[in-house]
Image (spheres, grey):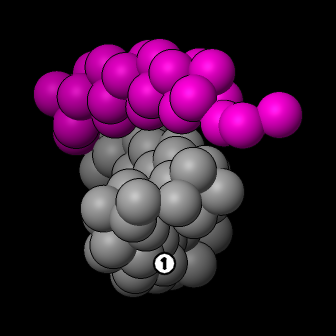
């Protein structure tokens, strides 16, 4: 079972890079995609960290996820409409 979970770090890394790219956009909709990617990467990193027993990584990802949810909320409040 651990063999497939070892591969989670790669999609987590790709999602993190895509998220960082999208967050830099001036378009609220694109930033929203970025926050979704960041939250998904937080979940993948936490799952990977769990099997690796990387407890500090899990705590970091939980903290970053809370910050991403805050960013999502602030971004949504800025959307026209």
Residue at mark 1: 11
Q: Position of residue 46 (x, y in %)?
A: 43, 41
Q: Look at 23% across and 28% down and name the residue there.
A: 60
Q: Main secondary structure of the magenta part?
A: helix
Place of residue 40 in the rendered image (x, y in percent of width and height, measured from the top left)? 58, 52
Residue 44 in sight from this viewpoint: no
Quadrant in which the N terminus is drawn: bottom right
What range of the chain is rendered magenta? Answer: 54-81
> What residue appears at the point 30 percent right and 62 percent down from the top-left corner?
24
Q: State yes or no: residue 73 in magenta.
A: yes
| Residue 12 location, quadrant | bottom left
Answer with left or right where residue 32 lies relative to residue 2: right
- Furthest-right residue in this view: 81
Using the rendered view, name the quadrant where residue 23 is placed: bottom left
Q: Secondary structure at mark 1?
A: helix
Residue nearest the observer in this picture, 77 or 42: 77
Compare residues 21 and 65 and report the one nearer the observer.
21
Left or right, 49 with respect to 11, comes to left
Residue 15, compared with residue 14, is above or below; it is above
Viewer-side residue, 4 vs 34? 34
* Quarter in which the C terminus is drawn: top right
Q: Residue at x 41, y 75 (%)?
A: 18
Residue 45 on image: x %, y %: 40, 52
Q: Is 5 contained in the magenta span?
A: no
């Amino acid at each position: 079972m651990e063999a497939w979970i070892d591969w989670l770090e790669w999609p987590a890394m790709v999602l993190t890079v895509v998220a960082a790219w999208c967050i830099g956009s001036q378009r609220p909709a694109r930033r929203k995609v970025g926050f979704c990617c960041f939250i998904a990467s937080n979940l993948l990193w936490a799952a990977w960290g769990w099997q690796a027993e990387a407890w500090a990584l899990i705590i970091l990802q939980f903290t970053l996820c809370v910050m991403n949810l805050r960013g999502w909320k602030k971004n949504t409040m800025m959307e026209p409409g």
